[in-house]
Image: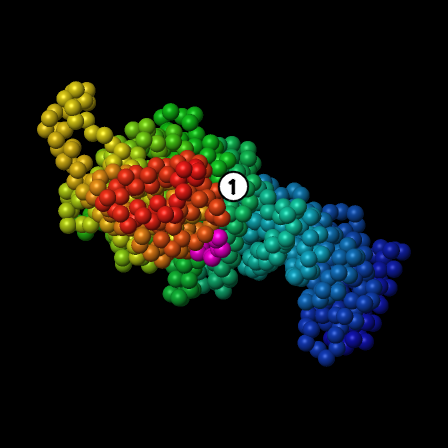
Amino acid sequence: MANSAADLTALEQRLSGVLDDLRACDSVASWQEAETISRTLANGLRSRDGPVNNHSILGETVLPRTVASLFTLALHGSLTPDDQYTSAVFELLRVAANLCMDHDENRGRLLEAGFPQAIVSLLEGYAENLPPPPHTRPLELSISHLRVIKTSIGALLNASIGYDAVRFRLTSLEAPLTILKLSTAIYPTGYWYNLTTSGPHPAFCNENEWNLRSGLSNWAWLAISELKDVKDDTLPILTPDFLPLLVQPLSAFLPNSSSRPLFDAGSELLSGLLDADLENLTESCMLIESLALDVDEIRLSLARGLQSPTEHNDIPCLSIILDFIENGSYPTSWAHAALDEADRKQKQKVFNICKAALIKAVVEVAGEDKNANILWDDSKSEVPGGNFVHKMVDWLKRYVKDLDATTSEHPPNTRSIFDREDMVICASLALGNLARQEKNSKALVSPPYSLVPILASRHLLSSSTDIKVKHGVLGLLKHLAQAPPSSTIIQNALNDAEIIRRIAESGVWDEKGDAMADVVQLSAIGVVKHMAGADVEHAYALVLPSIQRPELPTGLSQVLALVKRSDSVPIRSEGSRVLVNVVRMLWGNKLSTTTSDMAATGSTDRDGQEKQNKHNAAIRTVLTPESASILTRLVGASGKYPLLVNEGLVALTMLSISKEGALLVLDALTAPLGIELPPDSPLDSMSPLTVSDLGVTSPTKARVHLNVPRYPLDMLIFTLKNVDNPANFPTEVRANLKGYVQDIQKKADAFEEAARILRSQIPFKNQI
């Protein structure tokens, strides 16, 4: 075997001479010689561990151009080689693949010679006559042609690893798509195991061939992974054309009662084929997830395909994804004795990760604003929202129903989804994103869906509920609760299901729950904040003890306790706004107290008195030093956000209507703040819900302010002066504040010290 530099150089020169001979006269003998020389060269270049750098020596010769020229001649003007030339082409590809292995200079030389481009053209030739997916049987090719395709992919992989010039060229030629087309056709995931009773074609029973096919699939994924990360915004690498190919492996993991294996369980090939199938599934799911997260057009295309079969050439990609999430399962082939328990558990873990990745993708598709009117289909009155919405609602209802029916006496049947929290997470987050439109929310809470009682189920909202399930359910409830007060259908549905009580009982605000992600506690806060600001009955439910569980701390007391102990600025800010809405609703709600008013509303004297007692009890519960302190701290810490200052100011004004309340407020105004300021941007309560929200902590980066209040009272002064503040305070905010402070001045006899401070520091007359 020739391994020395001299031997390999001599072979390179001989190969160059063969090229000249073939250009002069094409002959079988010359091609056989080219094949033999190329095989020896390729073998000599397989390793870079020798004392001499053969790769650099040969790269500096004409070998890159010689190999590229011979490769082109071997095709004889065709897109793919004839059978008699496949061996020569195979060896030439090996030479190129080994020559550029870990060698950037040789990668560049091959690129200059046009060899990677020629390989892509060859692969396109093989892919040209492929049937459209899905592929129900492997592409029939001889072993010699399979070797050519596999080695072509390997040569492209070696040429592109870490070398941008080749990567850019290959992606511009759409090489990743061509490679994936061939790979999915040559190795259809699971075909070897999911055979029908009619039996396989005799051509597909060769174990060596299947070993070659599965290895080709592995190399294809390696090449695609290398090429997909090219950093070029002008060059879309993975387009919607990939989607029908990416969803194909999913179908292999759906139950198939009539399946049978191509090979015996004891075959040495079994383990490799199982690994190849799982790799295809894993790579596909991870790509779908990353594309759905990063590429707008992918999200739009998946949604369009649900309504328009022609979007993906009659392959319903999103429907296949949903079918896999719901029905995909561990294949029976994993039960073979060839797999040990550790390997089996590892495969199951990877499979579960794949489902989680697709759930993220579905949620992202539903969270795309432009998809709101695509996924929500109003064309069928009997199916509000269309098939996608119907399926998501059905997942939630079936989960609760199956859990209700599952007892020690009645174990679950094979169709039960009692343990499918992942489906609940997917459905609740997806519906939550679509519920950002009021008309959609109304449809979800109305018959035939009537979803709110389902969301209030003990299986979805309790102290034992998985945190990820709570994340989805509370996110959906938050968007439902954002409906305006005029949307009585939604407000009544939330009230009838006692959503506030169910949240308070779920333990989401318990001190032991502080270790959970802030986003879940924030979602729960968002639900009650919007509800308390929409209907006085919601405010009562939040403030007064539960009739069912009077020993349980009220929802408001739990929120305020969380506000006081939390280090999260958003939780403190949003939790304080819950109190703002409660105060505004209780103090701003005028009960019907006259006979004529009660007659107009159909109330009796007894009804009116009960309501008044309830209202008074709620006000007494809120009128505390704790409430005054939290509201003044909201004002004092919100210098960058006039909206929050104004909200807090309005609540303080209402709280100060009574002499008792005013005393509480003035005492709180002079208490040191000692808290951080709100984050750089207010929370967007209508932003899309995502799976990845869970576990993300809130940013608390420091900022520099010109005016930093030490006391809430300082913020009032800064607001009136409106100089050197982080934000400009509108006239209406300052007018509200002026009216409030003047009202305090009138109470100077009771609060002389606080009034003296205000009079001495605030020039009212010319301030506004």
Horizontal side of residue 701 vs 554, given as left or right:
right
In the displayed structure image, the side of residue 232 where residue 382 appears, left or right: left
Task: Work out which quarter of the rendered image holds the C terminus and state it.
Answer: top left
Q: Quadrant of the N terminus?
A: bottom right
Does the magenta-highlighted stretch encompass residue 704?
A: yes
**Which residue, as the protein is rendered here, is positioned at the far right?**
24
In the rendered view, does 594 fall on the left or right side of 429?
A: left
**Residue plotted at (45% across, 52% down):** 707
* Residue 335: quarter of image: bottom left
- Please name the residue that numbered disc 1 is placed on: 299
Whether residue 378 appears in this view of the structure is: yes
Return the x and y of residue 592 as percentages of the image width and height. 19, 26
Q: Nearer the viewer, residue 650 or 544?
A: 650
Q: Magenta part of the protein: which range? A: 699-706
Establish if 416 lies above or below 42: above
Q: Is residue 635 visible?
A: no
585 in relation to 410, above or below: above
Going by the numbered disc 1, the residue's amino acid type is Arg
In depth, the one of 327 and 360 nearer the eye is 360
